[in-house]
Amino acid sequence: MEAAAGADLSFVNLGITIQNLPNHITVFGFRIAFYGIIIGLGMLAGMAVAFSDARRRGQDPDVYLDFAIYAIFFSILGARLYYVIFAWEDYKDNLLQIFNLRAGGLAIYGGVIGAALTLIVFTRRRKQSFFPWRTAVSLG
């Protein structure tokens, strides 16, 4: 695992400067951005809270895991789709680049839309009310 050299970060009023702060690590030749690690940890933390809350309310945490798997997949898909739609000029001549997530290009709005649509479909298929789930997964 290798950390890459990066920019300096200064907190001027505190007199603190961190030099060469990396913005990613490299694992087996793949660059992993710190913001991606933070987002992944946030997903895991959110799932842990949802599972704990489900147990507290006497619900099956495995149902929340089922939803999380679908939501993560369709959120990433939605985030990429949203980004590509609004940056179509960059992709119209090379459609294969649409699938190149390593080059970046995810939009949070598309991720939220993807998760919301996934929740609507998930609750309908499970014949459950949308509104308690919306609150449980923090979409409302």
Image (spheres, helix red, strand yellow):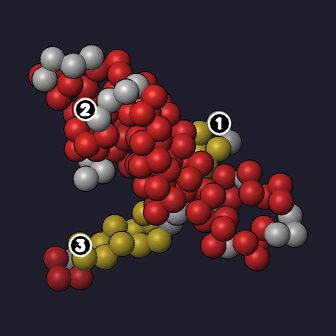
Question: Residue 18 placed where, x, y %?
Answer: 34, 67
Which residue: 32% across, 29% down? 128
Q: Quadrant of the N terminus?
A: top right
Label 3 crowd (10 A; few <14 / some 14-19 / many >=20): few
Figure check: 140 above or below 56: below
- x%, y% of residue 46? 29, 39
Q: Nearer the viewer, mark 3 or mark 2?
A: 2
Circles 1 and 3, Cβ within 8 Å, touching? The answer is no
Q: Secondary structure at mark 1?
A: loop
The answer to whether residue 29 of the structure is visible from this angle is: yes
At label 1, the amino acid type is Phe
Q: Which mark is residue 16?
A: 3
Q: Residue at x 22, y 33 (%)?
A: 49
Marks 3 and 2, the one that precedes in the sequence: 3
Dividing the picture into quadrants, the one containing residue 30 is top right
Q: Is residue 102 left or right of residue 38?
A: right
Label 2 element class: helix
Residue at the farthest left position: 56
- Tally the numbered discs: 3
Looking at the image, which is closer to me, 58 or 127? 127
List the residue tagged with mark 2: 50
For mark 1, what is the residue?
A: 28
The answer to whether marks 2 and 1 mark residues whose Cβ atoms lie closer than 8 Å is: no
Residue shown at 45% from the left, 28% from the top? 125
Q: Whole-Å distance between the Cαs marked 2 and 1? A: 32 Å
Q: Tell me which residue sits at (36%, 72%) in the image.
A: 9
Q: Give the mark nearer the N terminus: 1 vs 3.
A: 3
Looking at the rendered structure, the kind of residue marked 3 is Ile
